[in-house]
């Protein structure tokens, strides 16, 4: 499959517009990402600075009362699984891949809400500290976020080369990590 950077930028711009309209967010929330798109930057590439696209997944259990978090090695925090987008994947497939890679969890699937709306639950641009050992300056991750559902009681097998662990936490813990996404999920009845 051939990857088209210009088509990808237009896809991300459409997601930004649709997300802003659905959730009543001002366009200024994503001013840097919108500027990078307008300038024709390769936002799909992890070597594009000042920022590039990442994806992440809020993995919920069947009841929507628990969320799966990983102990992020580089940032030293508990966060949702996620990572860099890899062309030519779809954005939701990227989030699914990252969740499976980092947690080892099988039987996870995209929440049906995404099939109905074709939108992410949240889009968040956040600053990432410089990593001189990788020749990476301080930069921005434009994180496109999806809700996944875990099926059954599959065991967690976190990839310890990427994370320090994985654990189910009460959904309320997400308010300390991604409050806007947590509020969206509760308002839509996706989470309990």
Image: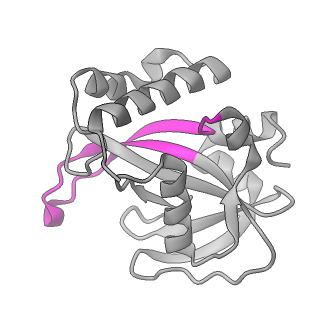
Say which residue appears at 73% left-offset and 81% top-offset: 154
Residue 142 sits in which quadrant? Answer: top left
Residue 74: % across, % down: 36, 66
Q: Is residue 24 something that shows in the picture?
A: no
139 relative to 122 in the view: left or right: left
Q: Is residue 167 something that shows in the picture?
A: yes
Say which residue appears at 22% left-offset and 53% top-offset: 130
Residue 126: % across, % down: 40, 41
Foreground residue, 114 or 27?
A: 114
Foreground residue, 129 or 162?
A: 162
Say which residue appears at 49% left-offset and 64% top-offset: 98
Q: Which residues are magenta?
A: 118-145
Residue 44 sits in which quadrant? Answer: top left
According to the image, what is the colour scheme of the structure? one colour
**Residue 125 against residue 149 in the figure, above or below:** above
Foreground residue, 86 or 179?
A: 86
Say which residue appears at 64% left-offset and 81% top-offset: 156
Residue 29: % across, % down: 46, 23
Residue 159: % across, % down: 48, 80
161 relative to 146 in the view: left or right: left
39 relative to 98 in the view: left or right: left
**Residue 54 against residue 68 in the figure, above or below:** above
Please check the rendered image and state whether residue 34 is part of the magenta-colored stretch, yes or no: no
80 relative to 115 in the view: left or right: left
Please check the rendered image and state whether residue 130 is part of the magenta-colored stretch, yes or no: yes
**Could you tell me how many numbered marks the image carries?**
0
**Residue 166 against residue 85 in the figure, above or below:** below
**Residue 87 against residue 143 in the figure, above or below:** below
């Amino acid at each position: 499959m051939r990857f088209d950077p210009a088509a990808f930028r237009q896809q991300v711009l459409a997601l930004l517009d649709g997300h802003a309209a659905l959730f009543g967010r001002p366009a200024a929330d994503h001013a840097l990402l919108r500027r990078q798109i307008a300038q024709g930057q390769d936002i799909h590439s992890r070597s594009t600075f000042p920022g590039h696209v990442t994806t992440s997944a809020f993995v919920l259990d069947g009841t929507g009362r628990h969320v799966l978090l990983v102990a992020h090695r580089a940032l030293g925090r508990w966060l949702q699984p996620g990572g860099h987008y890899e062309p030519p994947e779809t954005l939701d497939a990227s989030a699914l891949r990252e969740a499976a890679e980092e947690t080892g969890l099988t039987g996870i699937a995209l929440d049906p809400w995404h099939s109905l709306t074709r939108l992410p639950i949240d889009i968040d641009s956040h600053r990432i500290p410089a990593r001189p050992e990788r020749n990476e300056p301080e930069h921005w991750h434009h994180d496109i976020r999806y809700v996944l559902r875990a099926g059954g009681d599959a065991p967690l097998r976190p990839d310890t080369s990427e994370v320090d662990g994985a654990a189910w936490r009460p959904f309320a813990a997400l308010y300390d990590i991604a409050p806007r996404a947590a509020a969206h999920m509760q308002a839509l009845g996706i989470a309990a």
